[in-house]
Amino acid sequence: MSEPRIDTSYEPFSQEPEYVELNRAFVQTLLPHLARCRRILDLACGTGVLTQLLLEHLRPDVSGRPTNDALVPVAALGVDLSRESLKLAREQMDGLPWRPPTALIECSADAPPVRSGSVDVVLIGNAIHCFPDKDGLAAEIHRVLAPSGLFAFNSSFYSGTISVGTEEFYHQWLKGALEHLRQKDADLRRAGREGITRVRGRGKPAFSSRWLSPAEYGAVFERHGFEVRSVSERVYEMSQRNFETVGAYAGLAVVLLSGYPAEAAAEALEAAVGPAFRALGARTIPRVSLELVAVKR
């Protein structure tokens, strides 16, 4: 009998109520800054959560006539490298009660196929830390935005995201995941099956790339022609289930447990969450999300 497979896509975590509410609160902070929102570009869009939440606020009124033409989108574009995430985004977008014509394209988010000055709003949801060249990204966002266009991102991977006093949880979590991998490897080999082999150099070690601080992110966009309107931090609570679903995401697993096969790493991280919570006697773990809003000068 084959072992049950876990869902290693981002979709389960992206649908967690706590994650959706975190992003909904972020999107609501953008509304006072919106002067025009005809064309939306969602970079590293994943399953399209931010665009979907923004569209909730930008629908035409019930008569079908826009309350403000400048704020009713006529086009939305999401780009991401994950074909699986884009498929999920397309399914969710198709289920919306209203949306503008929407394109979802598999390509690198740091080089979107968009004309200069053609976009009113650019969003990045919890992914800016994935871009190695932050200056190049800022310059590209500045290129595609129309004058006075809005850029906004949030991220739970920056210098300051781990709440003071929660470090032991992450230590217990990763230690438990490694022990899970060692135990499963031993069990497989005893059963005469192929074990779990770690390939060194397959990926960068976890946390080998330095996370930027809020001030550093602000400085990046200021020097590339943006006026930073706000930089804020939002504390939110993550449950055991939240950590299990994000731990099972292959994209995170191959970073936290670099060198291990993606599915084995995801399974180990998912399995290690419960023991880490119990070791600390915790019900939730606080984490902090960075939110930045800027306008093209």
Image (spheres, rainbow, N blue to C red):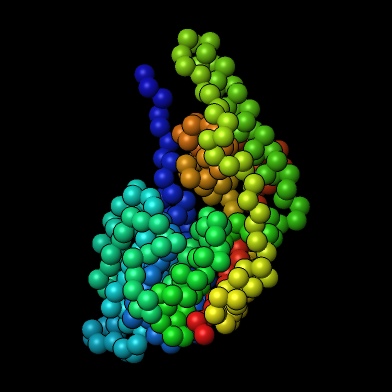
Image location of residue 76, percent across then percent down: 32, 71
Q: Nearer the viewer, residue 76 or 284?
A: 76
Name the residue rendered at 40%, 57% in the picture.
108
219 left or right of 36 in image: right
Q: Nearer the viewer, residue 158 or 203?
A: 203
Name the residue rendered at 25%, 71% in the picture.
101
Indicate the quadrant where residue 268 lies. Answer: top right
Indicate the quadrant where residue 49 lies. Answer: bottom left
Image location of residue 52, percent across then percent down: 37, 67
Reply above or below: 283 against 191. Answer: below
Name the residue rendered at 39%, 85% in the picture.
36
Q: Nearer the viewer, residue 43 or 250?
A: 43
Residue reaching furthest to the bottom: 68
64 left or right of 42 in image: left
* Picture mark count: 0
Q: Which of 204 and 86 is in front in this view?
A: 204
Confirm whether residue 229 shows in the render: yes
Confirm whether residue 98 shows in the render: no
Image location of residue 44, percent across then percent down: 43, 59
Q: Quadrant of the N terminus?
A: top left
Reply above or below: 96 against 143. Answer: above
Indicate the quadrant where residue 75 lies. Answer: bottom left
Reply above or below: 103 against 200. Answer: below
Name the residue rendered at 28%, 78% in the picture.
74
Image location of residue 143, percent across then percent down: 43, 75
